[in-house]
Amino acid sequence: MLTRIFLLLSAALWGLYGIYCLLVPGSLHEAAGIVAVTPTGTTELRAMYGGLQTAIGVLALLGAVRGSLTRTALVTLGTLALGLGSARLFGVFVDGHFTAYTGMGLGFEWFTVLASRYLLRRK
């Protein structure tokens, strides 16, 4: 039951943020200081922040509703969050800058890593 709740919450967070970024890529300018200067850049924001994160949300949803995909969803969520969290932490040290957006990202990503690992060990 705890695994299902985690996956449903992950689906909502990743999926809704992804859809928002797909539809309103300019929102990343104020939130994270990310701005596209060409249409190709806007398309890249839609793809990486919109499409990819929406797909992660769909995977989490599938893991929540199909037992055969639960383990795959947990492994994938944990691995992707580990990559994001590690790169973000590296960036903080290399670039020497930390914002509330960065802190929220780190908290969400490392929570996802630890929760995925914990839930996988319980299975």
Image: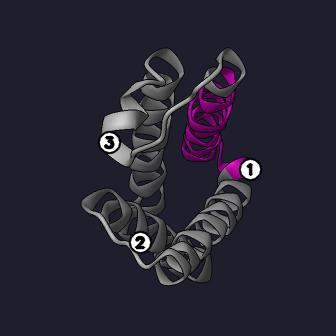
First in sequence: mark 3 vs mark 1:
3
> Does the CB distance between marks 3 and 1 fall below 8 Å?
no
Q: Quadrant of the N terminus?
A: bottom left
Q: Which mark is residue 31?
A: 3
Q: Amino acid at mark 1?
A: Ser
Mark 2, secondary structure of its residue: helix
Eyeballing the image, is 39 above or below 18? above
User: Magenta region: which residues?
Assistant: 43-69
> Which of the pair 65/76 is nearer the observer?
76
Quadrant of the image occupied by residue 85: bottom right
Query: Taken as a whole, is the magenta stretch helix, strand or loop?
Result: helix
> Which of the pair 11/70 is nearer the observer?
11
Mark 1 lies on residue? 68
The 10 Å Cα crowd at callout 2, few under 14, some 14 to 19, many 20 or more, is: some
**Residue 119 can be seen, yes or no:** no
Relative placement, left or right, of 119 versus 70 is left
Q: Nearer the viewer, mark 3 or mark 2?
A: 3
In the image, what residue occupies the spot 40% across and 61% down?
A: 105
First in sequence: mark 3 vs mark 2:
3
Asked whether residue 68 is drawn in magenta, I would say yes
Q: Marks 3 and 1, Cα distance to the nearest angstrom?
A: 37 Å
Relative placement, left or right, of 32 versus 92 is left
Relative placement, left or right, of 121 versus 95 is right
**Residue 21 can be seen, yes or no:** yes
The percent coordinates of residue 68 (x first, y second) are 74, 50
Q: Which mark is residue 111?
A: 2
Q: Amino acid at mark 3?
A: Ala
